[in-house]
Image (cartoon, rainbow, N blue to C red):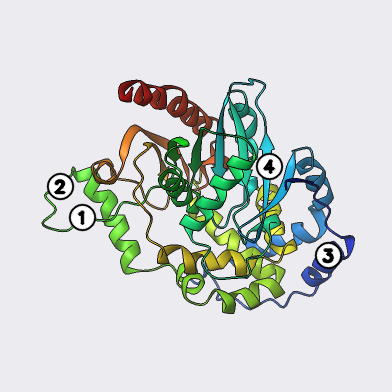
Amino acid sequence: MIKPFRIAIPQADLDDLTDRLSRTRWPNEVEGAGWDYGFPLARLKELAEHWRTGYDWRAHEAELNELPHFTTEIDGQNIHFVHVRSPRPDALALVLTHGWPGSFLEFLDVIEPLSRDFHLVIPSIPGYGFSGPTHERGWDATRIARAWAELMRRLGYERYGAQGGDFGAGISIALGAVATEHVVGVHVNYLPTRPPAPDAGVTLSAADEARLDKVRELLANRPPYQALQALTPQTIGYALTDSPVGQLAWIAERFAHWTDPATPVDDERLLTDVSLYWLTATAASSARLHHDAPRGALPPCQVPLGVAVFAHDITRSVRPLAERLYDVRHWSEFERGGHFAAMEVPEPLAGDVRDFFLTSVKAAAASAG
């Protein structure tokens, strides 16, 4: 059963947040530390004070409630999603999937341009936000993809596309694999490509090798957040669920490091995202995806793939390596934008998604037919 959903955070929860922020115990900081030891104290105090005294959750809640929200239960798990229908009755449906530390909020600025041509289904990943915490093991990318396939079936969509970044990219690719007969194509704005084996026989350009050097650096120096969430998500979850400033620093650091300095995510949108994690107490359950996702190997995906590469992303994909694994029909490179492309550069991303599904996917279908 699909039920309408309305966001209504209890006032007691908002009062508790304000109280906790007012009683924050701040650590000291080495003079002139900058980013050498982690998130700078002055900047975090600025964000926390705005969250406590200037940020208005109710205003953002009212804005979000203008969207059509729904929930349903799939595979024993509550699933929250936004469902926006295009004015075109024959429009193709797209399922848009966020990543960590994002949420369905990532797609707010692409809803208007994309819904001109597509019906949009924007779920919250199990364990995230209004989908609530998960209660059992095994919610990896493939299981989530199967839940998305069931969601699209319940909504009556026989043929649809998938788009995502971060974890959403892996889930979208998995959806193309588990629901091949229904998915017309997959578009991603994050596609990690690992360095090939020395005997792989792949010829790469100097620019491609430079991109792989960044990948090698990340593989050799695993980011601390990733190690903690992959190995001990419950342990870090205690701190993040108990301290709003801890949750704020944990997420704000990723936004600071992963966005293009020329296209930053504004503080209001950042605080709404952090508030969503805090008010739903999903720090630990969202972190579990880092633990569970790599443990299930993705099945092969044969549907047409479109890739958008943004210059300031964590890593940039290498096309010859991607083409060894996927049926790449569309490839775009952007000079602006980072890991949160839908929030940083919504119009270019929406345009690329439109081009892929309305041009490349149709051309692939025509050549196959």
**Closer-to-camera residue (288/79):** 79
Q: Position of residue 261 (x, y in %)?
A: 50, 46
Q: Amino acid at mark 2?
A: Val
Q: Position of residue 142 (x, y in %)?
A: 46, 56
The residue furthest right is 11
Q: Residue at horizontal 80%, vertical 66%? A: 17
- Labels 4 and 1: the sequence-earlier one: 4
> Closer to the camera: disc 4 or disc 2?
4
Mark 1 — residue? 196
Mark 2 — residue? 202
Image quadrant in which the C terminus is located: top left
Count of numbered badges drawn on the protein? 4
Q: Which quadrant of the view contains residue 319?
A: top left
Q: Amino acid at mark 1?
A: Pro
- Labels 2 and 3: the sequence-earlier one: 3
Q: Give the numbered dot on residue 13.
A: 3
Q: Amino acid at mark 3?
A: Asp
Check contact, mark 1 vs mark 2: CB within 8 A: yes
Locate residue 355 relative to residue 285 in the image: left or right. left
The span from disc 4 to disc 3 (Cα, nearest Å) is 24 Å
Q: Residue at horizontal 65%, vertical 46%? A: 105
Q: Is residue 241 visible?
A: yes
Locate residue 164 relative to residue 10 in the image: left or right. left
- Labels 3 and 1: the sequence-earlier one: 3
Label 4 SS: strand
